[in-house]
Amino acid sequence: MAEYTTANYHDVDDQRGLHFLRDELNCENVGVTVLECEPGWEGMEHDHADDEQEEVYLLLEGEATVTVEDESVELSEGDAIRIPPDATHQIHNGDAESRFVLVGAP
């Protein structure tokens, strides 16, 4: 029988709007995070060159901009963006609350 785990992101501690599910789900090769952004929220500019982690951001609600290197990418509900490990990137939330699912894996 297959082993599986479940978690509800509402039950995970909120760390500046981030709900990290990797440990809760016992993930070995993928990270999953729910990000709830207040209006005007900005994430930390960063990359994952050292850990070679590719990321996908899926915007479930709201509108936001993701800056990848020097390019601003406007996202609306339902849009997803894949970010390569070596690209510097940052989330800039718009004027309303938004919710993302962030997925990363080496």
Image (cartoon, helix red, strand yellow):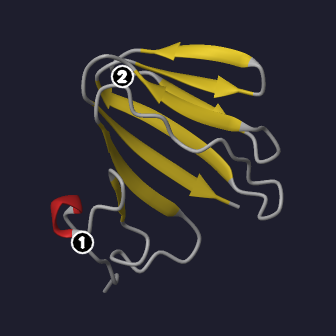
Mark sitting on residue 78: 2
Mark sitting on residue 88: none
Disc 1 and disc 2: Cα gap in Å? 24 Å
Element assignment for label 1 = loop
Residue at numbered disc 1: 6
Tell me the kind of residue under disc 1: Thr
Left or right relative to 71: residue 64: left
Instruction: Name the one closer to the observer, 106 or 74.
Output: 74
Q: Position of residue 89 (x, y in %)?
A: 67, 36
Q: Position of residue 14 (x, y in %)?
A: 28, 61
Q: Give the residue at x 31% y 78%.
A: 4
The 10 Å Cα crowd at callout 2, few under 14, some 14 to 19, many 20 or more, is few
Q: Give the residue at x 41% y 80%.
A: 26
Instruction: Name the one closer to the observer, 27 or 15.
Output: 15
> Mark 1 or mark 2, which has the lower sequence index?
1
Q: Give the residue at x 82% y 45%.
A: 86
The 10 Å Cα crowd at callout 1, few under 14, some 14 to 19, many 20 or more, is few
Q: Give the residue at x 39% y 15%.
A: 76
**How many marks overall?**
2
Q: Is residue 20 above or below residue 69?
A: below
Instruction: Name the one closer to the observer, 72 or 56.
Output: 72
Q: Position of residue 106 (x, y in %)?
A: 71, 61
Left or right relative to 38: residue 41: right
Q: Position of residue 65 (x, y in %)?
A: 51, 20
Q: Is residue 84 above or below residue 62?
A: below
Tell me the kind of residue under disc 2: Gly
Quarter of the image containing the N terminus? bottom left
Q: Is residue 63 above or below residue 40?
A: above
